[in-house]
Image (cartoon, rainbow, N blue to C red):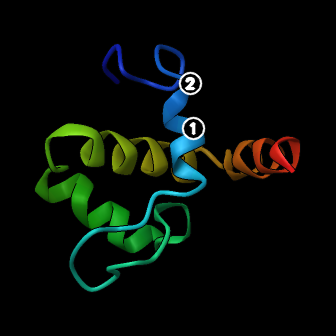
Amino acid sequence: MTTDSPNGNPQLLLDLLHYPMPFGKHKGQLIRTLPVAYLEWFSQKGFPSGKLGQLLQTMYEIRINGLDYLLNELEMKQK
């Protein structure tokens, strides 16, 4: 990952709690709830540039490494 990884930018993890997919088949769905197959497709085809790409790539890494619980814990701390 780049320097904009969660370690370099913790705001990315917070954004994953509330950021909706802005286009496509899953428009309006929170990125954190996107199917892993959709994230894998982006991984193969290329993530979009900018913040959206960073969020999708971060979510992909979280999913493939079984780290979903980190977002669940973060969400609980915000309540």
Q: Amino acid at mark 1?
A: Leu
Judged from the image, the secondary structure of the residue bearing numbered disc 1 is helix
Place residue 29 in its image quadrant: bottom left
Between 31 and 46, the one lying in front of the other is 31
Between 77 and 2, the one lying in front of the other is 77
Distance from Cα at disc 1 to Cα at disc 2? 6 Å
Place residue 28 in its image quadrant: bottom left
| Furthest residue in direction front, as rendered | 79
Give above or below for 51 relative to 28: above
Circle 1 Cα neighbour tier, 10 Å, few/some/many (<14 / 14–19 / ≥20):
many
Q: Which residue is mark 1?
A: 13
Q: Which residue is mark 2?
A: 10
Relative image position of residue 20 (x, y in whole percent): 42, 66
On screen, residue 46 versus residue 76, left or right, reads left
Relative image position of residue 61 (x, y in whole percent): 47, 43
Judged from the image, the secondary structure of the residue bearing numbered disc 2 is loop
Q: Residue at x 55, y 57 (%)?
A: 18
Give above or below for 26 relative to 33: below
Relative image position of residue 22 (x, y in whole percent): 28, 68
Q: Residue at x 70, y 47 (%)?
A: 71
Mark 1 in CB contact with mark 2 (< 8 angstroms): yes
Q: Residue at x 74, y 42 (%)?
A: 70
Quarter the N terminus occupies: top left
Q: Amino acid at mark 2?
A: Pro
On screen, residue 42 versus residue 29, left or right, reads left
